[in-house]
Image: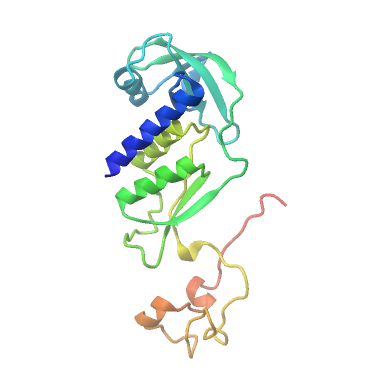
Amino acid sequence: FFYIQCFIEKITYLCYNIKYRGCNIMQRYFVNEKQIQNNVITIDELDSHHIKTVMRMRENEKVLVCLNNESVSHTYLCKIISLSKNVLLEIIEELNENNELDFKVTIAHGLVKRDMQEEVIRRLVELGAYAYIPVIMQRSVIKIDLSKRKFSNERFERIVKEASEQSERNKLMKLMCMMSVMLFGFTGTPIFTANANTSGGGRISDASQAFTKKESKFHLKTTEQAFGRKLHTYTVVHA
């Protein structure tokens, strides 16, 4: 059912382009600054394979290339000048194109199983999210050591790239480090022992009294028990 759904979406996308843009459907690729030298873009091996084997393109055919730059987005109209091991493109002109949202949206989402995680990333890219923060929730099925917080891997980064190309984005969505739900910071009144038994607080009779597993699972501790003596250290970078 999943593959049938993907097939239907691709057919719908194809029909949209034919109806509203004519048959001029142009493939899009993302590159970094090191791949551009003297108005010539060197495509990496994976994208070169896609151009030659999957798309079966020929020399002088045109493609769109987006420079993966966080500050400014650049989109170039290019033509193929060489179909060697690494395909070479010549920049024809820079296009005035911006398909990104006018504001940056960062999504924090609880971790799910790997196959569903890939689908979450793909859909967030298509919706135009700027960044994605995977969050380890209290009831998350997946248990991960927070000391190894790097989330992005080659598979997820490839999904971001492919989904960005298909949805005609100008920038790649950022994959942030994993976080625990307890690491999102603290704002408001600290929870002391005196008010720990109010709504939202944990039921404690003594600050030094340890929580039972059943209590700690459903109720908050005091601020000091949850975060220690120091919650966070902040550095002011712009005032």
Q: Residue at x 46, y 22 (%)?
A: 35
Front residue of 142/33: it is 142
> Image height check: is 28 above or below 108?
above
Residue 68 seen in the figure: yes
Which residue, as the protein is rendered here, is positioned at the far front?
19
Provide residue 23's location: percent of width, then percent of height: 44, 19
Provide residue 224's location: percent of width, then percent of height: 53, 76
Q: Residue at x 50, y 33 (%)?
A: 169
Relative placement, left or right, of 7 versus 237 is left
Residue 33 seen in the figure: no
Provide residue 53's location: percent of width, then percent of height: 29, 19
Query: Dividing the image into 4 quarters, which one contains the N terminus?
Result: top left
Q: Residue at x 50, y 23 (%)?
A: 21
Front residue of 164/132: it is 164
Which residue, as the protein is rendered here, is positioned at the far bottom?
205
Front residue of 124/143: it is 124
> Image height check: is 202 above or below 102?
below
Quarter-of-image position of residue 45: top left
